[in-house]
Amino acid sequence: MIIAIAAVSGGGKTTVARALASKLPNAYVLHFDDYELEGPSDLCQWIENGANYDEWKVDPIIRDINILRDRKKCDFIILDYPFSYLQTQMRDLIDLSFYIDTPLDIAFARRIIRQPPNLMSELVDDCTHYLNVSRKAYTHMNDVVKPSADDMMNGQSAVDEIVRQMVGVIHKRRSTES
């Protein structure tokens, strides 16, 4: 079963993907950010131009999915992957997509904490850029990616609670497919 976890940057994808993998048997995580993918160089401009998800060349991820699928002991592949079902090459591979619905202020604060600026002027620059430019990318995720997912998780919940809910959905899905 291939499970995608989408959210805005700072929304909890990586943390939840790792925690979910620890609760599922024979689960492997592939992280979007670990790949050097061909794609738009300016995300904000890409959003302004209509956000064609097929501009992202995800062949390296698909290659790794196929390698993991060939392993007999791989029951779950968890994708820390921001696009849900919106990229054509990935759409048919994904069995279940979750969206972590994290309030934008929390996601932005997490990004600042994850990569703290050295100077107050850098913090002001980061905040100004967010308000004037990159917030459009965040709201795009909520407007376009979120509705494409199969299920939504509350990004304000504790990681353990999000994972508990995801495991329930996964087990329910697997039982109905059997």
Image (cartoon, rainbow, N blue to C red):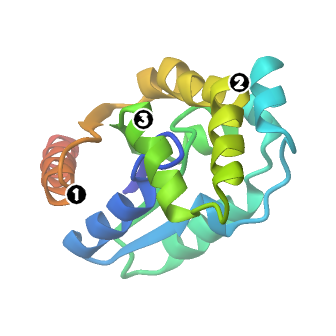
Of 88 and 152, the residue lying toward us: 152
| Closer mark to the observer between disc 2 and disc 1 | 2
**Residue 148 placement, left or right of 64:** left
Q: Marks 2/1: CA distance?
A: 31 Å
Q: Position of residue 91 (x, y in %)?
A: 57, 38
Secondary structure found at label 2: helix
Above-or-below relation of 121 to 102: below
Marks 2/3 in contact by CB < 8 Å: the verdict is no
Name the side, left or right, on which 123 lies relative to 151. right
Which of the 4 quarters of the picture holds residue 36?
A: bottom right
Look at the numbered disc 3 and give the secondary structure of its residue: helix
> Residue at horizontal 44%, vertical 61%?
14
Q: Earlier in the sequence, mark 2 or mark 1?
A: 2
Give the residue number, with chain letter if any, for mark 3. Answer: 105
Q: How many marks?
A: 3
Closer to the chain start, of discs 1 and 3, is 3
Q: Which residue is mark 2?
A: 132
The residue at which mark 1 appears reads as: 159
Q: Secondary structure at mark 1?
A: helix
Amino acid under disc 3 = Asp
